[in-house]
Image (cartoon, helix red, strand yellow):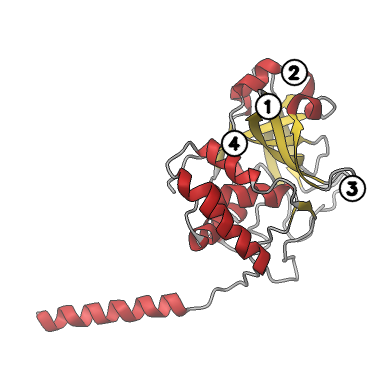
Amino acid sequence: MRGKTWLLLLLSACLASCAASEPREYQTPISSPTEKKLDDIFRTFVRPRKGQDHGEIINRVSAAFLGTAYRGGTLIGGPDVKEALVVNFSFVDCTTLIEYVEALSRSHDRETFLRNLVHIRYANDKVTYTSRRHFFSDWYSRQPRIARDVTAEISPDYVTVEKDLNRLPNGEPDLPGIGFTPRKLTYIPAAAINENVLHHLRTGDYVGIYSFGEQEDVSHVGIVVRHDGRVWFRNASSLPENEKVIDSPFLDYIRFKPGMIVIRAEQTGY
């Protein structure tokens, strides 16, 4: 009996060793500056605040990206290009910013961050181009769900529409290789967004700027934060006068936009 027990332990140890040494099916390119910033964020913004409200952690973590340069197209992958798990804190666009922030806010070290980034960026935790969450609404529509749509809870003046995401007016796909996605979307028109609506937003909520384009749900995304007695839209701005992560006064920013979709990250352990 004792011999069988030792044999089972030995087999378990061998299997664990093989699993640990087995290479990932994807590459994870991380530069030295990103490695350093990753360590700094955990030391300064995450570890000392373990157990804090999730929205406040999002606020603190996202503050570490203020001033980070804007650059689109940093992800690697496509219909004919093998997907890589890109981690680049030197340049972000609006989507990679919120992916990094949410993954960091759920993590306590480098390995948990990488696992959470896979969980957030890809449906079913599969690092492939077709599994990538290409749309903001994928956060609450594709499994595993990482946030819930709270738009209707923020204001009674919401509008519901149906779209065929990724389908251009001429019937061609906007993004090649991922097909079309029928989806019902709820948004709050800009004309209905006022101080009372802002009162119902929480720090750490993710906001998508609704798009009238049939092929997309939103045209831009950012994070709700509060400081100096005001509500701000923290976002990676591509505008020529910015081209970096900034805080924009929320009402001033949204006033001339079509409207907004609001999602709230599912509470999770750290």
Q: Which residue is mark 2?
A: 192
Q: CA distance from mark 4 to mark 2?
A: 21 Å
Q: Is residue 128 visible?
A: no
193 relative to 94, above or below? above
Residue at image point 65% right, 29% down: 227
Residue at image point 69% right, 61% down: 88
Q: Are marks 4 and 2 in contact (CB under 8 Å)?
A: no
Q: Which residue is mark 1?
A: 231
Q: Are marks 1 and 3 in contact (CB under 8 Å)?
A: no
Instruction: Please report whichever mark, 2 or 1, sits nearer to the chain's N-terminal start.
Output: 2
Q: x and y percent of residue 177 in the render?
A: 75, 61
Q: Which residue type does callout 3 highlight?
A: Asn
Q: Which residue is mark 3?
A: 170
* Numbered disc in front, either 1 or 4: 1
Q: x and y percent of residue 95 in the render?
A: 71, 49
Q: Which residue type does callout 2 highlight?
A: Ala
Checking the image for residue 255, the label placed there is none
Q: Which residue type does callout 1 highlight?
A: Val
Q: Badge 2 local density, few (<14 within 10 Å), some, or many (20+)? A: some
Q: Quadrant of residue 192?
A: top right
* Numbered disc in front, either 1 or 3: 1
41 relative to 54, above or below? below
* Numbered disc in front, either 2 or 1: 1
Q: Is residue 96 visible?
A: yes
Q: CA distance from mark 3 to mark 4?
A: 37 Å
